[in-house]
């Protein structure tokens, strides 16, 4: 679709909350800076360009040359995919949409003077700033974990990339008859069903190649936080004797040399491969800038109509770093939707228009239970102006009846489409 056709389309105008008679009045040389090229940041960068008819300059600051998707990356651990299968370069944003991609880190943000300082020392001024830094893992919440991670002994692979490959090697090296243990932090955390999907596909790998091995799920939550009945049915029927689930097991310490995890209950667990996920919080640059003002300073408060920060004007926070609305998961699909709503709000504000009074969000989350079969959960979320928050639309979405290969096809198509929507 050509850019002018896109701008005139009902989808674009719906994002902006405008009728077809709208016209542009953007100030000359308006600039939006985006920090972080994940599902939220990359989408926002692309859609600011699209929705402004390419009149707003957009600078995306991202240290990596390519985006590596967390969704689908669990299949790299099970051997169903290669890391290249979940990797998309940022060149599409620059070549197709004129986004200036700067490979660097942001060392500081001056929200009063509206500029960011890069690790390389240069500064970039902005009219509007999008901060989408994902999550940071709170290693200090589990004694000994920081040192074990630094030594490459206990990995998380909760940011897809090098650790994903390293954890796969640990699983390949584990003897048949060994134990893989994954710990899950108290919610909220990035990707609610992700740990249970990981446990399932690794169980599938063991069933095929290491049939005497075990998967142990040690969950700080009292029960499975997402798609519980579906996962439990799969574990009971497909992985009986391979997967064991224990709720209300909050990890407190690790001993990497002994291969031991300690918990707040009177129990130590020994395993060959330890995949210990600590608590999470908003990404470092959001914390450093003081945007993390909610939930014991773990998450960033936003105006849900626009995703503008509640503590810094002209700064928009997206994705996993925000304090979520009721029923809103920390997922890639949701971050992609955040990016679109924020982009529409930014273009409207810079054009002197009213912001869309009733933005909508959708979410679909697919989970593999082996390398082919998938279950999903889906939902629609509407902005309720009277309560200044998003709420799940009654009767929308739902969950799978059970895993199927057809849903596996849908899941891979979803991935291809959302990567293209965000990055190409």
Image: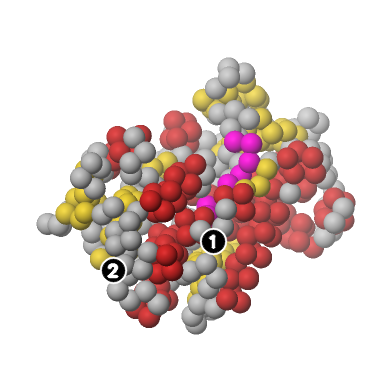
Q: Residue furthest top?
A: 121
Please give the name of the residue rendered at 58% of the width and 47% of the height, measured from the top-left corner: 68
Camera-side residue: 238 or 43? 238
Label 1 CA crowd tier, 10 Å (few <14, some 14–19, many 20+): some
| Res 294 label | none
Determine the main secondary structure of the stretch shown in magenta.
loop
User: Is residue 40 shown above or below 414?
Assistant: above
Q: CA distance from mark 2 to mark 1?
A: 23 Å
Q: What is the quadrant of residue 98 in the picture? A: top right
User: Is residue 212 shown above or below 160?
Assistant: below
| Res 244 label | 2
* Residue position for label 1: 80
Q: Measured from the top left, where is residue 56 in percent x and y?
A: 77, 37
Q: Measured from the top left, where is residue 367 in percent x and y?
A: 50, 66
Residue 348 seen in the figure: no
Camera-side residue: 214 or 25? 214
Residue 330 seen in the figure: yes
Camera-side residue: 104 or 398? 104
Which secondary structure lies at badge 1?
Answer: loop
Which secondary structure lies at badge 2?
Answer: strand
Coloration of the structure image: secondary structure
Please give the name of the residue rendered at 46% of the width and 39% of the height, measured from the top-left corner: 283
For the magenta stretch, what is the residue range? Answer: 64-73
Mark nearer the N terminus (2 vs 1): 1
Please give the name of the residue rendered at 58% of the width and 19% of the height, measured from the top-left corner: 120
Q: Measured from the top left, where is residue 2 in percent x and y?
A: 87, 53
Q: Measured from the top left, where is residue 377 in percent x and y?
A: 51, 71
Please give the name of the residue rendered at 52% of the width and 40% of the height, measured from the top-left corner: 133
- The verdict on residue 216 being magenta is no
- Answer with left or right where residue 232 lies relative to residue 316: left
Q: What is the quadrant of residue 333 in the picture? A: bottom right
**Proximity of marks 2 and 1: CB atoms separated by less than 8 Å:** no
């Amino acid at each position: 679709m050509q850019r002018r056709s896109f701008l005139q389309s009902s989808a674009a105008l719906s994002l902006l909350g405008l009728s077809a008679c709208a016209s542009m009045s953007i100030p000359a040389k308006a600039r939006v800076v985006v920090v972080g090229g994940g599902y939220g940041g990359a989408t926002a960068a692309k859609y600011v360009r699209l929705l402004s008819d390419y009149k707003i300059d957009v600078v995306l600051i991202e240290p990596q040359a390519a985006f590596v998707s967390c969704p689908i990356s669990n299949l790299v651990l099970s051997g169903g995919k290669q890391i290249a299968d979940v990797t998309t370069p940022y060149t599409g944003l620059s070549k197709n949409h004129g986004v200036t991609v700067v490979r660097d880190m942001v060392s500081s943000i001056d929200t009063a003077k509206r500029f960011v300082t890069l690790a390389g020392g240069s500064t970039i001024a902005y009219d509007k700033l999008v901060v989408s830094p994902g999550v940071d893992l709170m290693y200090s919440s589990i004694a000994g974990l920081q040192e074990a991670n630094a030594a490459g002994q206990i990995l998380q692979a909760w940011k897809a990339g090098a650790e994903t490959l390293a954890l796969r090697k640990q699983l390949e090296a584990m003897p048949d008859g060994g134990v893989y243990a994954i710990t899950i932090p108290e919610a909220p955390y990035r990707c609610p069903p992700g740990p249970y999907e990981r446990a399932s596909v690794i169980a599938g790998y063991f069933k095929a190649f290491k049939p005497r091995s075990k998967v142990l799920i040690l969950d700080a939550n009292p029960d499975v936080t997402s798609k519980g009945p579906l996962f439990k049915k799969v574990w009971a029927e497909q992985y009986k004797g391979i997967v064991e689930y224990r709720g209300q097991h909050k990890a407190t310490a690790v001993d990497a040399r002994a291969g031991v995890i300690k918990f707040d209950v009177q129990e130590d667990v020994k395993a060959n491969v330890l995949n210990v996920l600590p608590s999470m919080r908003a990404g470092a640059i959001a914390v450093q800038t003081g945007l993390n003002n909610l939930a014991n300073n773990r998450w960033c408060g936003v105006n849900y109509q626009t995703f503008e920060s509640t503590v810094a004007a002209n700064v928009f926070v997206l994705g996993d770093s925000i304090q979520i609305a009721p029923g809103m998961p920390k997922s890639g699909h949701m971050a992609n939707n955040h990016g679109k709503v924020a982009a529409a709000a930014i273009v409207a504000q810079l054009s002197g228009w009213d912001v869309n009074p009733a933005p909508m969000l959708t979410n679909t989350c697919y989970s593999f239970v082996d390398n082919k079969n998938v279950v999903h959960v889906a939902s629609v979320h509407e902005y309720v102006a009277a309560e200044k928050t998003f709420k799940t639309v009654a009767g929308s979405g739902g969950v799978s009846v059970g895993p199927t290969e057809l849903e596996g096809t849908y899941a891979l198509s979803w991935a291809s489409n959302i990567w293209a929507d965000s990055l190409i």
